[in-house]
Image (tube, rainbow, N blue to C red):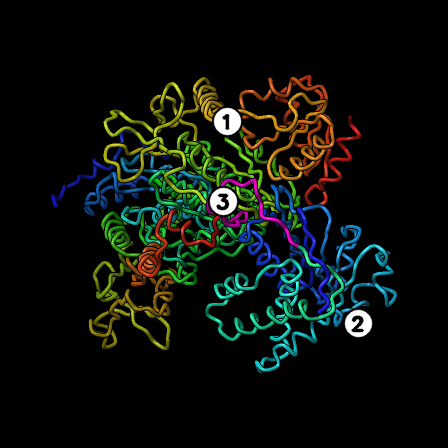
Amino acid sequence: MNKAQTIQLDNIVIRFSGDSGDGMQLTGNLFAQLSAELGNEISTFTDFPSEIRAPQGTLGGVSGFQVHVGANKIYTPGDEIDVLVTLNPAALKVNAKNLKKGSIVIFDLDSFQPSDLKKANFSTDNPFEELSLSDTIQLIPVPLTTLTKSSLEDFGFDNKTVLRSKNMLALGLVCWLFNRPLDKAIHFLENKFRKKTQILQANIKALTDGYNYGENLHLTVSNFVIEKSHEMPKGKYTSINGNKATAWGLIAAAEKAGLQLFLGSYPITPATDIMQELALQKGIGVKTVQAEDEIAGITMAIGASFAGCLAATSTSGPGMSLKTEGIGLAVMAELPLVIVDVMRSGPSTGMPTKTEQGDLLQALYGRSGESPLAVLAAPTPDSCFHYAFMASKIALENMTPVILLTDAFIGNGSSLWRLPKLADLPEIHPHFVPSNMENYKVTTRNEDTKIRYWSIPGMKGFQHCNGGLEKDYTTGNLSTDPENHEKMVLTRKQKVDNIVNVIPELEIEGNTDADLLVVGWGGTYGHLKSAVDNLNNKGYKIALAHFTYLFPLPANTENVIGKYEKIVVCELNTGQFASYLRSKIPGKTFTQFNKIQGQPFKTEELENHFISLL
Amino acid sequence: MEETKYMPADFKTDQQPRWCPGCGDYAIFNALVKTMAELGVSPHETVIISGIGCSSRLPYYTNTYGFHTIHGRGACVATGVKVANPALTVWQVTGDGDCLAIGGNHFIHSVRRNVDINVLLFNNQIYGLTKGQYSPTTKKGFVTKSSPYGTVERPFRTAELTFGAGGTFFGRLLDVDLKTSQMVMKAAALHKGTSVVECLVNCVIFNDGAHGWLAEKETRDDRIVVLEHGKPMIFGKNKDKGLILEKSELKVVTIGENGITDKDILVHDAKCKDTFLHTKLALMEGPEMPIAMGIIRDVEEETYEMAMENQINEIKKQTSVKSFDELIDACEQWEI
């Protein structure tokens, strides 16, 4: 046995990459879960094509799952790769530019044959040299295909079925490399393949053989230990992605408010998982309708809201465009509704599986008429739970639609999440009409807060006709009276503006006495926070103002931001939040740092830019 | 339980309907509130959802819960209401443009799902509220403001569309025929599933007399046949005309002529799952054939909202995850 020494690490970035049918997402997810369970911090990133099965071995079909494992708090899935597990040359090529110097590349020797190289548009027979990687990386060639075939030869599977377990063999090898005991991985597999005994046994066999291969063969690399995380508060944790966290936030809010949860939705990447997760939770009583289109999704939700549910709809950019008219109706009818937009690269169909923050202005302003509503944006995968909960709370207590912006990066990415109890979550008090109220009209509202009272079918004596036409402020009847319309527009505006009183103030992170204020919003938090922390550790003075409540903005926004001379607004768009801030804080100079590549920021590129500003 | 008796007035608000004088919508409205009173469902447990168009103003005039929504989406909002609270009686008021043009997709899907809503489809074969453009039911060649040389479009036939979408109930009524209107509306309300009621209404301004051929009192009985389950398809002023099936085609015969007796006349089976005869009946056109009114199809199938309730109850029996805290307890987790 030629086991080299064991090396201790603070954190490491591992990327599993192969064809979109190679099971890279499952492999990566399993590894992340294992690491989390062993007490590490994790952050993951999925990067896959929208083609379900692009031609095998081609650049267009490369699917990747990146996991950042750390002993201390980590906020991003990592910029550059320490360990790349690549199942074909195309995956190597796609990831080459992100390989760290000295990184380890584990590759399937059997899939690096001349025909494979040709499919990935290599012109020579040495892809590593061709990519100028030869001197900078450590190579671990493993005949994954051959090994998997011999590992599973007693199962009597056809060739195709055998090769599906190739990813498990690779995972076994990585588990060895990082000292991950297999029992937990086997436990996960048992859950995943509970009903497919043969497949389960095959996967366990391949996993074990992969581990033993690392253990027994003459691998000339060290194996690594990543210390347990010491910073995290004690408690029960799980690893959760943003979409699941969003779904669970809605479930928690409905139960807290004592309401039926209803979701009307239509399948759209990358938001579909929210609908699928809620469709699964029938035991909790969640009602989901997979509607005939995006419009039906939101208008069914509006119907359910009219009937007294916590109603939600989930979508992504193009679907938001279709829902626009429905959102306008919810504004006019003053009904509670949560609209989740898991943003992707646009416009139009754009790049469905890639992330972007391009829907901000659409969320803020993209409706006909004067139609203000509350807009929130979740910063991390696990916090999608909190923000879905808060979006629901704001909607139900203020009788308004609320848009929650997440994105493909945090929707699909996962992070550690400390499990909450329902009892620990804030109370939610839907704005129902007091049962003793007399002379109720559809427009009857609390005159201080301007919040309309909610009466629902079944309540005797509170019948009314709601609708999209303008109503008289007092009688609730239809009205085209000029002064009344203005009053109604201002009333609806005031109601939403008043939400500023219930949202938290903006907090500055990093060095408050900074030379540079970094401003961000939503899913870029992890990268911005990492870059700001890193630079402060290096002696620079930088602060971060990260927004999660976008409309209304926190009350102290102008005060806080006004203190800083030099401000850079960082966004994955051409500068939508920057222009929004300019309209809210006129006269203030905001510089911008933008990226519109369908990919999250890299911590390093942020740091470099910030240094250039100092 | 104490039963409350309702009067039509209990279902009306103090709002004066604002349809044009002579509009067929008044008649439908009157038939509806009478039907509601007869059904005995309280106003606060009744919901009327509408889209956009002249007919869609109706919820303002009823003392029920109402929601005047957006163009074409009434079926979706109604679906949301019914799924949210299956105990409610839900009506959808819509027109030929609202339901079959902009809302066509939602119409076929709500029919396919068989949500228990009662759809009153006011068909005047024209867009009234936007002042006279052709609709999906306007007859080919008809001159309207948007088809000044006559439409070149083939119209939908509502029944065909309903049956194609798997519809379980189809009824038809004529605005001026109160008795049949009430009979059909009541049956539609009692039917569990999506009840499509095609209301032939007259637009006095933009399409006056679209159904005039049927409406004339003198000749109406000869031109329509009112269908009811289990009753023979007999019609005519003198109740001497009837329908028979000959070589898979419907044919009008006269009782007492050519040896035809009462017993030869078809007896209507609205509950037959097969749509063959229902389609034949619904698509009859004058002047050779009478127009079918009444309850053409009334078939029992599981409703969408009950299928959903049943599934939820079934899963509740099987799972231990019935609350948020149980969901949390059941997920993969570890102590740190």
Residue located 70% across and 60% down the image: A85
Locate residue A111: give its quadrant: bottom right
- Is residue A183 found left or right of A10 in the rendered image? left
Q: In this orientation, which residue lies closer to the viewer: A330 or A40?
A: A40
Q: Position of residue B77 (x, y in %)?
A: 40, 44
In this picture, is A587 found above or below B303? above
Which residue carries the number 2 mark? Answer: A113
Q: Residue A246 carries which label?
A: 3
Q: Do the residues labelled 2 and 3 touch (CB within 8 Å)?
A: no
Q: Residue A504 carries which label?
A: 1
Q: Tell me the distance, in whole angstroms, between the alpha carbons under discs 1 and 2.
A: 58 Å
Locate residue A522: give its quadrant: top right
Residue located 62% across and 65% down the image: A172
Magenta residues, as a range?
Answer: A225-244
Residue located 59% across and 30% down the image: A547
* Residues packed near mark 1 inside 10 Å, few (<14), some (14 to 19) or many (20 plus): few
Q: What element carries label 2?
A: loop
Q: Where is residue A100 in the image (x, y as percent from the top left)?
A: 77, 50
